[in-house]
Each structure stands twice: as C-alpha cells, then as structure tokens.
Amino acid sequence: MVETLTREQVNSLFPARNVDTNKADYGYIALVGGCTQYSGAIRLSNLANSSMRSGVGVCTVAAPSSICDAIMPQILESTIFPLSDKDGNLVFVEKEFDALMHRNSVIAFGMGIGDTEEVEKAIKYLLENYDGTLIVDADGINAMSRLGKKTLINHQCKLILTPHPKEFSRLSGRDMAEVLGDPEGSAEGLAKFLNAIVLLKGHTTYVSDGKRTYEVAKGTPAMATAGSGDVLAGILAALAACHPDRLLLATAGAAYINGYAGEIAETKSGETSLIASDTAACVKEAILRSLEKDEKTVKRNKRILNTFRVVTLCLSLGFAIFMGWYGHTQRLAAKHATDTRSDYAVSMNFLAKDIYIDGVLVNNYELKAPFAILDGKILVPLTEDVCDALGIHAYWDKNKTSELLIRTTTPNYKGVFYSNYGWNLAPVMASAKPKATITVENGKETEIVTAESGEVASFNDGEILYVAIRTLRDANLINIQTYYDEIGGLYISTNPEIKAEQYVSENNMSYIQGRCEYIQSRLTNFTIGECSVYEYLFRHEANVMGVEEDLLLAMANTESGFYKYAISSAGALGMMQVMASTAIANGVNPGDLFDVHTSIEFGAKYIRDAITNYGDVKKALSAYNFGGGAVLAGNYNLGYAESVLSKQNDLRNRCNNSGYSNEFLTEVTCTK
C-alpha cells in the first residue's frame, strides 16, 4: 500500500539539537563523483553544500585529483579527498576506497563520475566490502546494471538507489513504458529483489523498501535541469547519516526537501531559468519553511495563549496573597527541616588521559560517554560498550538510579574502540547520588555494595550511569583491578591474576613524557600532569586526522608557544593561531579557538586537508600561514614551513637524545 509522505513526518527528521552535541553526532559522509567531462566544480559544490545545509556533521568530497583544485574554493565547509585518475577519469585504487569506507558511515557514489570500467570496479568493490550505507546515483547505477546478479543481491551495505526511469529500466531490465505505467509497483519490486531502498524519480517520486512505499508529491517541472539529482543526493546522504535507523523515511524526506527547495527556487528564478544551484541555495529555506506551523494554527495558538495569560494573572495574584500568609508560618520550621534530596547537581570533568583495558587502548575521547573525574574519583560510564569490555552487564531504572544491578559476564572488546562519538573538554553537568545500593551477581553468588556520596552519578536524565571505579573494584565478585598514573593514564585488568600496573608500558610513558617536557619548555608554569592533558589532545587529533603529532606540536610551538589565549597583530587566535575569518568560513566561532581542544582540532584538520590537497607538506604549511589562495597563485615563500619542520626535527632529536621513545603503542603486553 502506498502512503503519502506528510510534512509532520519530514519535520521529525530535523529535531532540536542537544546543548552538548558536536559534529560527530551527525555523521561522516563521503560524496564520490566527478570527472573531466562532467567535472562541474559547481555541480559537486551543490552536492556538498546541500549535504551541509541538511545537517550532516562532516562531509568529504572524493573526486579525481585533476579536478580537485577547481572544486576546493567552492566547498569551504567540506573536505577534499583526491582520487587517483588518468586523463581526468577515476582510476580505482583499493586502498583509497578502504580509507573512505573506514572513515564514513555513508557514501554517495556516481554523480557525474563517468561511465568507465574503473567506475564499474569501484562500485563492485563497495557492494562487496562496505558495511555502511551506500547511496548509488547516476553513472553509479549504470555501472551496477552491468554487474552480475550475485553481486547485486549479496551486497554487504545498506543500499539506497536513486534512479530516474531510464536508469531504472537499465538496472531492472523492465521496459521504460512498463516502469512509467506502474512506478510505485516498479519501485517496490526492485527494492524487494535487491533488498534495497529505491527512490524512483518522476513528477511524483516513489520511495520503497519492498514492504512500505511513500509517495512524495513535491517538485516542479523547472527542476528538469542538469544537476538537480546531485542536490537530492547531497540531501539524502546527510539525512541517511543523521538517521541510520530510519533510512526509508530519511530517503523520502530527502525527496520532499529537494522538491520543496525546487518549488521555492522557481518562485525566484522562474520555470525556464531555474538551475540546480538555485535549488541548492534554497535547501535551507525549504527546511525552515517545513518546520514552520501553518498560519491558521499560529493565530489560533495566539488566541489561546492570550486567554491563558489573563487567567494565569488572576490565579497568580490570589496565590501570591495565600503564599504570603503560608510562607510566614513555615519559615521557622524550614530552618530545622532535613534535606531529603535524593541527588544533587555536580560538574564532572572529562578524563583527558589514555584508558587501557587488559593492555588494549580505549580512546576515551571517542567513547559515547567518556571516563570522567568527580571530586578526585575516576568514574566509569556504564554504557553497553564499556560494560562489555569490563565483563559486566548493568541494569537500572531511569527513575531509580540509586538502585543498580550488575551481572558479571565475559569481557568482550568488540566495537568499544570505534564508537567515534567525540566529547569536548567542557565539564558535564550530572546528578550525583548521596548514596546508592549496588547488587552484584556472579552466577549464584550475590554481593551488596553501598556507594557513598558522589560515587554514582547519572547523566542525561538517567540514560547513562557513572560509577566510581573504586566502587566496582571493591565489589568482591567483580574481578577488576585498576592503576592510575598522572602521565600514562588509567590501566584496568579484568584478570584477577594480573595486576593492572603490569600493563603499564614504559615505551608509552617515555613517549608521553618526552612530548610533555617539550610543551613544558614553553609553558614553564605548567606541571607535567597539566602538560599531559595538552599532549593527549594533540595525540588524539593527530590520530583522528591522520597527521603526525610531532608536526602539530611544532606548529603550535611556532604559532603561540602553546599559549591558548594568544592573539597576533594580524588577528589570529588561540594556540594554533587561526584567523578569525578562516574560522568563520569553516563554521567555527572565533571565540571558541581559545578552547585548547577546539584550536588543536581546527589546526589538525586544516593541515590534514592541506596536505591532502597539495600533496606536499611545505606547501600545506605555507597555505596554513599565507592562505590557500596565495599558494595557488605562487605568492608565498617557504620561511614559515621550514621553521616548523626545523622545530619538528628538533623535537625528535630532543626525544632521541634524552632517551625518549618516538613510537606510541595502542596495545601493550603484560609484563608478567
């Protein structure tokens, strides 16, 4: 049965964002397309900008390297990923696509990429190896139509196809007239056959997963112009990343917003003159208008609100008179009343240190909820992935978070190290419990543990519970041993025969110590422990962005001497000395650059992208100092780049001469 998509359903795809949110919450996507014949720097920028306007966290445009310079100035908020090419056409390289698959939860493939054997190799590889959401459009669909039935049916990914009727005909083998005569049945049949979601474009769009089909009656004949499908693909990639559990609705919602944006653009450009970039420019307005209430509802609610205000005013006056009398009789008694609060607000701090469980590094920053510190106590987040790693299952009632049941199981590390949520250093407000009762069950054995004040805290209305690690450790039935070092971080052993400190890596301690001393050589009033927070953030961002930590440290030393409140005469801000205009162009509030993590993250991303775009570290560093335009025009010198690289070399020599390691290990062996 076909159902018409409603505006209310579309609006549910754009909920209000939480205060403590960040870009990682909204997904990483890659848009793979373009060739010399259909390079369309503007076309690909429409694709990327549509994604960013639709709410995705991070967008990467992957295109043949020979057209990247033309694309780059058009997509300031997105990242460029150059792909190997020959004569402006894609050359499939397995490791490049592995990198895209590893980093991104959604890949959109095929927009203007050309119809070649290399494209066919690429789409075959994605179908057989990618386990994220794969959106296939345009030339990607044409390439799919030449693949064998086995490859099409046995894909590993969540597959979304966006064909127009001719592309649908090639892929399905059905006659065009048959497709046009029964679009809803055609979409449903192909979706069921391929175990995919099919978005069949037309004056009415049909979106089906083989079980449920949406009819989307949005759009205008003015959108019959090159590139309109690219705008749709960009919106769809964003919504698929934001709503991985509602892909069918996200796909239909993308068609709705794309069609609505086209309708708005037509009122401004006219039916004949509308082009795809006009539609892309109206995506924001389409989303905002969709979220607005209709005029009649607004007026009705206004009348109700005014009536409510009058009634409330009268009641308030009467209540105030009563409370004046009642309050007077209660003041003395209130002085002697017992505080019966079950919890109280606290500020937990992110533990900016490494976490090792049985010798395996858990990147604290990338957990859904990181390990935290409260009043000197280290708290463990009882999320599913952390509990699995520790060998426990935790159960609690969100309304009774002072009562916790823990059952022991077998430690399992699968998935805990790849969550990639990402928190910042800002304190997290939580509710601490004055006391909590914890029941520990290990088979038939049971232990009751009382957690004292501040040893249990709940976050996000009880969704996540934190427990002091010493409380877990002291439970006789849980075989967890811990060791904390101010430099090396937190070590946990789930084996009762192995002490946690036996996993301490002298190699890693040496690595961290050497870089902490390098930072401390400029920040002489900092302790090594304070410097270790900075070192952790540099190392984390170096790992996330795929750049060398030593390079980032050398840049920060050159720019500000690691001083987070540095401001240059040119107006550059923060530890990494980012120009305010550059920050704004990349969606960063310049004032936020005084936050150490934001500044390091921005610098790491910029230099990573510049190295990717220019293929040369000296050019990349020159772009960081002089700007990308100056490097493209050849209007720069290498003085800054050579200064940074000299400091990087000095750091390495310093570590070598002091006996410190230049290698950091993510997995360490027990010394037992």
Image (tube, grey):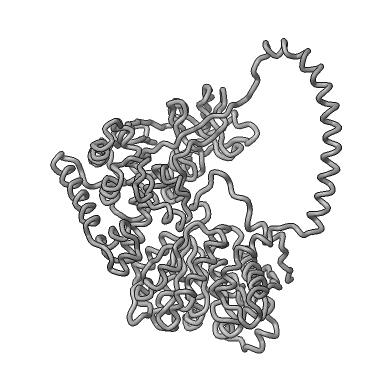
Camera sees residue 648: yes
Tell which of 164 and 605 is nearer to you.
605
Q: Is residue 456 above or below residue 339?
A: below
Tell which of 253 and 40 is nearer to you.
40
Residue displayed at 24% across by 61% down: 618
Q: Specify the quadrant of the image occupied by residue 207.
A: bottom right
Judge left or right: residue 234 versus residue 626.
Answer: right
Q: Is residue 418 above or below residue 229?
A: above
Residue displayed at 51% across by 29% down: 445
x, y (%) of residue 60? 44, 64
Q: Is residue 212 above or below residue 650?
A: below
Residue displayed at 81% across by 45% down: 305
- Quadrant of the image containing the N terminus: bottom right
Query: In this figure, what is the number of numbered marks?
Result: 0
In this view, which residue lies farthest toward the front? 569
Tell which of 495 and 548 is nearer to you.
548
Judge left or right: residue 353 versus residue 151.
Answer: left
- Quadrant of the image containing the C terminus: top left
Q: Is residue 16 above or below residue 237?
A: above
Camera sees residue 356: no
x, y (%) of residue 458? 56, 34
Judge left or right: residue 71 versus residue 220.
Answer: left
Q: Specify the quadrant of the image occupied by residue 402.
A: top right
Judge left or right: residue 670 versus residue 280.
Answer: left
Tell which of 153 and 533 is nearer to you.
533
x, y (%) of residue 341? 64, 23
x, y (%) of residue 371? 44, 37
